Amino acid sequence: MGGTDGSGGADDHGGADDPGTDNLGGTDDLGGTGSPSASGLSARDEAVLAVESRSWQGPGPKERAIREQLGISPTRYYQLLNALLDDPQALAHAPVTVNRLRRVRDARRARR
C-alpha cells in the first residue's frame, strides 16, 4: 500500500473496507462528513491530506498512522484520498500534495 516514494498509491486501493475498522459511519473525531472548515473541506479530509503530505519510510508506519490518527482502514483512506484528488477545494487547500498525487495517478493510468 503506497510505496516508499511517498506516492501513497491513491489509485491502487478500491476494495472493501476492513469490517469493524472504519468508524466513519456518520461522524468521527475528525469531523467525519460534518461541518466544513474555512477551506471548505471537512476536518477528516484535511487530516487525510496532512497524512499524505508527510514523507514515510515505508507502508507500515503510514498504515499505523492512518489507523491511529484517522481511525479508518488504509483501504478507506485511499478511497477518500482518491476522491479528494478530484475536489477543487482539496487542490486549493494542498496544491503541492494534490498535484503530485494527480501526476502519480495519471502516470499509472497511462501505463494500463
Image (spheres, helix red, strand yellow):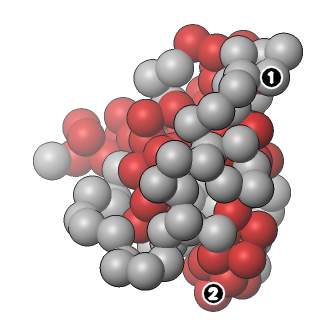
Quick check: 20 left or right of 40?
left
Residue labelled with disc 1: 37
Neighbours of disc 1 within 10 Å: few (<14), some (14-19), many (20+): few
Reply above or below: 103 against 86: below
* Residue in the picture at 43% in, 35% down: 83
**Local crowd at mark 2 within 10 Å, few (<14), some, or many (≥20)?**
few
Q: Quadrant of residue 5?
A: bottom right
Residue 8 seen from this side: yes
Q: Amino acid at mark 2?
A: Gly
- Image coordinates of residue 4 in percent, x first then y, are 62, 73
Element type where label 1 sits in the image? loop
Query: Can you give x and y, in whole percent of width and height, for residue 68 in the image?
Result: 73, 77
Which residue is more in the foreground, 16 or 108?
16
Residue visible at 25% across and 67% down? 16
Q: Choose between 46 and 62: the one closer to the eye.
A: 46
Q: Tag 1: residue type?
A: Ser
Residue where numbered disc 2 is placed: 60
